[in-house]
Image (cartoon, rainbow, N blue to C red):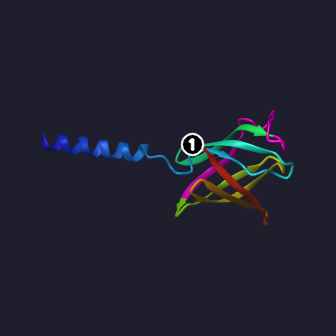
């Protein structure tokens, strides 16, 4: 009986740990790109890493617009490095390039930057959407 109680306690504890969401998970509004467009990204687990999919696109006027990138993974292969820092990949629709990314989470803001072939770019500050 004691053994059963220990196993049950361990299973409940590990299930609680697995259910804890990473602070990066959720909806994020991107900064405007070179064309003045922005997007709504849904970040969720994909395997042991985090990915972010473009859910909506917005034009320079802030109104929702059609985009061939809806449904595309904008954030991929992203891992929590601790202390609010993340690394992975970010796709930039305005340039058609995937950058090795650095993400820094601070409360409800996410500073995005990345490099490809030694060329680095700041992706601006994304805002958490409730």
Image position, residue 103 (x, y; %): 64, 59
Q: Residue at x 79, y 63 (%)?
A: 117
Q: Nearer the viewer, residue 90 or 103?
A: 103
Q: Residue at x 16, y 44 (%)?
A: 3
Total numbered badges shown on the rendered structure: 1
> Left of 1 or right of it: where is 112?
right
User: Which residue appears farthest toward the bottom when viewing the image?
Assistant: 118
For residue 73, what is the image quadrant?
A: top right
> Left of 13 or right of it: where is 30?
right
Q: Please tell me whether residue 79 is drawn above or below residue 26 in the rendered image.
A: below
Q: Which residue is mark 1?
A: 46
- The quadrant the N terminus occupies is top left
Q: Please tell me whether residue 48 is drawn above or below residue 55 in the rendered image.
A: below
- Magenta residues? 59-80
Image position, residue 75 (x, y; %): 67, 48
Q: Mark 1 packing: few (<14 Cα in 10 Å), some, or many (20+)?
A: few
Image position, residue 111 (x, y; %): 67, 59
- The quadrant the C terminus occupies is top right
Taking the magenta stretch, the answer to whether it contains residue 77 is yes
Taking the magenta stretch, the answer to whether it contains residue 18 is no
> Left of 62 or right of it: where is 83?
left
Q: Secondary structure at mark 1?
A: strand
Q: Residue at x 53, y 51 (%)?
A: 23
Q: Nearer the viewer, residue 42 or 117?
A: 42
Q: Residue at x 18, y 42 (%)?
A: 5
User: Which residue appears farthest toward the left when viewing the image?
Assistant: 1
User: Which residue appears farthest toward the right when viewing the image?
Assistant: 35
Image position, residue 45 (x, y; %): 55, 43
Q: Please tell me whether residue 47 is drawn above or below residue 122 in the rendered image.
A: above
């Amino acid at each position: 009986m004691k053994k059963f109680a220990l196993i049950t306690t361990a299973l409940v504890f590990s299930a609680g740990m697995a259910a804890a969401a990473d602070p990066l998970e959720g909806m994020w509004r991107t900064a405007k790109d070179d064309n003045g467009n922005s997007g709504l990204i849904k970040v969720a687990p994909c395997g042991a890493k985090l990915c972010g999919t473009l859910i909506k696109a917005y034009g320079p006027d802030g109104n929702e617009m059609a985009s061939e990138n809806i449904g595309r993974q904008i954030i991929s292969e992203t891992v929590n490095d601790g202390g609010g820092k993340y690394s992975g990949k970010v796709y930039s629709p305005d340039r058609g390039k995937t950058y090795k990314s650095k993400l820094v989470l601070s409360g409800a803001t996410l500073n995005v930057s990345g490099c490809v072939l030694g060329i680095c770019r700041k992706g601006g500050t994304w805002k958490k959407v409730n």
